[in-house]
Image (spheres, helix red, strand yellow):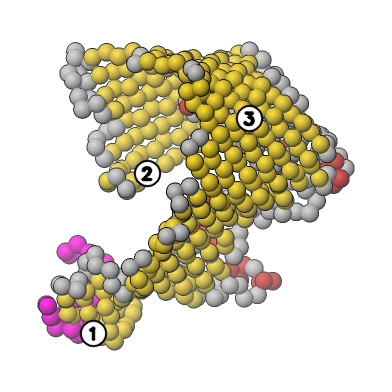
């Protein structure tokens, strides 16, 4: 034991008492790793802001119920904020942290409740944050009256009998402004939506299947329309080393439901068999692949959409789409010793060429339920698809070329790399959807360029960046830079900058996004 009369406790550096807890008696129990403080006064600088006749704080890593170290800060969102977390060691396999969070500008206390568990069914975390009233929100939205603001988050991952998998990723908030007003590690206003997903999977050798439901809470008050998958079935069957070939069959069945009554809905069934001939050795690889993409749509609730004169495309009740795909992808690896410039270092030169062919199919009679344009960074140049999802599969008759160089130190650690590539279009890439402004341009040739680079400055610091140039816009389409600091294997801090030109956004934004 160590007993201090009129002592204080802080975790700040010496001479920098940003906060402290002062008590008439402070007892430090080194065996139990706890500090007991009588007549405790929590101070920010010299100013006392909280009093408790008794306070118990942990001073080690031993699990024990009790108050944790308080925290205080000042923000422009909420002015003065104060946290007093309480840790509850419920059982060896579960615990909870209950944090009263006072926000001066909001005029109330938000109760932040985190619960963690580990059972035979899996591990998970639940968070329930609740603010009984918010005077700032109520002043801005007088018609809503008293507003209870809340967040619920549930993350669960479990495996049973080595073949069954259970996953939950669920986030929901009381209103679309929640993440604008409150900082939370469970979501951000820049995401634009919150996801509620449940899935059950089964996996054995060469086969897996997953049944899931997915819903979205959209934060855009002007357009809250969103599609949910209720339910979705994904199936994969693999058979590698079938002679010299690898084979795969992918299947999906999904039912799309919209949050609005007047929007199209659909059941989509997709089947995608693939055969691949992989050839590789120490200095190169050549992969030849062929697949067939067969999709059936049964669309309903089309009257409102088809009768709108602003919609150029008229949707069909039943649509079948069959598209073959052929791809050849080759890469070589050249290596040289850098003895003249950097003894012990090695440089590689890795040229890569890919040819992709997908015939054109008119998809104007199919509504876009889950497709969006994918960004073309260097690795994205070699994708099979221009769009994510299955509703828009663009035609392709193109060659992608690229080259990467890497530098390794004497311990075979990659210290630097840079990649540059381009796509050359023999014919324009199309889906037949007139709502996509990008497809109004019928240019061919070398249209898209991309470059990426990474520099490992030291063991902890790294710098990566990328840029994409589109000749159809005569400007940089997108670019990004990231400064990384890696404290250890589990902790990484990034400072990111991303840019998308107005021309790129305007050209790639489907017109129905603004009219739906």
Q: Position of residue 440 (x, y in %)?
A: 72, 25
Q: Residue at x 56, y 22 (%)?
A: 275
Q: Position of residue 286 (x, y in %)?
A: 46, 15
Q: Which residues are magenta?
A: 1-25
Using a 10 Å C-alpha cutoff, classify the residue at mark 1 as few (fewer than 14 neighbours), some (14 to 19) or many (20 or more): some
Q: Is residue 377 left or right of residue 40?
A: right
Cα distance between the residues tagged 3 and 1:
69 Å
Circle 3: element type:
strand
Using a 10 Å C-alpha cutoff, classify the residue at mark 3 as few (fewer than 14 neighbours), some (14 to 19) or many (20 or more): some
Q: Which of the two discs, 2 and 1, labels the residue nearer the N terminus?
A: 1
- The outermost residue toward the left is 2
Q: Residue at x 67, y 71 (%)?
A: 144
Q: Residue at x 27, y 46 (%)?
A: 487
In the rendered image of this protein, does residue 486 appear above or below residue 17? above
Circle 1: element type:
strand
**Residue 38: mark in rendering:** 1
Tag 2 residue: 494
**Mark closer to the observer (3, 1):** 3
Q: Is residue 24 magenta?
A: yes
* Location of the N terminus (image quadrant): bottom left
Q: Main secondary structure of the magenta part?
A: strand
Cα distance between the residues tagged 2 and 1:
41 Å
Circle 2: element type:
strand
Can the viewer see residue 317? Answer: yes
Tag 3 residue: 272
């Amino acid at each position: 034991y160590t007993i201090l009369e009129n002592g204080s406790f802080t975790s700040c550096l010496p001479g920098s008492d940003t906060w402290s807890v002062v008590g008439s008696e402070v007892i430090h129990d080194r065996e139990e790793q706890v500090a007991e403080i009588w007549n405790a006064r929590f101070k920010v600088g010299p100013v006392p802001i909280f009093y408790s006749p008794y306070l118990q704080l942990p001073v080690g890593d031993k699990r024990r119920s009790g108050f944790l170290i308080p925290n205080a800060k000042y923000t422009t969102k909420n002015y003065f904020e104060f946290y007093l977390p309480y840790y509850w060691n419920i059982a060896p396999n579960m615990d909870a942290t209950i944090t009263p969070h006072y926000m001066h500008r909001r005029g109330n206390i938000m109760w932040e409740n985190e619960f963690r568990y580990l059972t035979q069914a899996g591990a998970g975390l639940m968070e329930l944050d609740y603010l009984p009233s918010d005077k700032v929100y109520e002043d801005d939205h007088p018609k809503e009256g008293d507003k209870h603001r809340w967040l619920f988050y549930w993350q669960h991952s479990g495996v049973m009998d080595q073949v069954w998998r259970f996953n939950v990723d669920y986030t929901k908030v009381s209103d679309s402004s929640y993440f604008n007003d409150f900082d939370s590690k469970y979501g951000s206003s820049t995401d634009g939506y919150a996801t509620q997903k449940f899935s059950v999977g089964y996996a054995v050798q060469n086969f897996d299947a997953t049944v899931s439901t997915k819903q979205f809470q959209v934060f855009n008050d002007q357009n809250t329309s969103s599609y949910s998958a209720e339910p979705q079935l994904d199936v994969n069957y693999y058979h590698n080393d079938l002679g010299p070939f690898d084979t795969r069959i992918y299947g999906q069945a999904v039912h799309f439901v919209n949050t609005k009554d007047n929007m199209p809905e659909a059941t989509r069934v997709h089947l995608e068999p693939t055969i691949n001939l992989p050839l590789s050795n120490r200095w190169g690889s050549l992969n030849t692949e062929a697949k067939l993409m067969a999709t059936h749509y049964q669309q309903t609730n089309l009257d409102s959409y088809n009768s709108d004169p602003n919609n150029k495309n008229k949707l069909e009740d039943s649509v079948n789409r069959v598209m073959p795909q052929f791809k050849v992808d080759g890469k070589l690896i050249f290596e040289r010793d850098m003895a003249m410039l950097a003894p012990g270092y090695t440089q590689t030169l890795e040229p890569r060429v890919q040819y992709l062919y997908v015939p054109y199919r008119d998809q104007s009679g199919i509504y876009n339920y889950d497709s969006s344009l994918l960004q073309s960074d260097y690795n994205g140049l070699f994708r099979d698809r221009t769009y994510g999802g299955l509703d828009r599969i663009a035609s392709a008759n193109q060659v992608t070329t690229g080259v990467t160089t890497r530098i390794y130190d004497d311990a075979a650690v990659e210290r630097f790399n840079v990649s540059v590539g381009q796509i050359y279009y023999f014919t324009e890439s199309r889906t037949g959807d007139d709502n996509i402004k990008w497809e109004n341009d019928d240019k061919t040739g070398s249209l898209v360029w991309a470059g990426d680079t990474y520099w490992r400055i030291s063991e902890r610091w790294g710098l990566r960046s990328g840029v994409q140039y589109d000749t159809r816009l005569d400007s940089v389409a997108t670019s990004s830079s990231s400064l990384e600091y890696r404290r250890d294997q589990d902790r990484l801090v990034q400072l990111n900058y991303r840019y998308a030109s107005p021309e790129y956004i305007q050209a790639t934004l489907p017109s129905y996004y603004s009219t739906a």
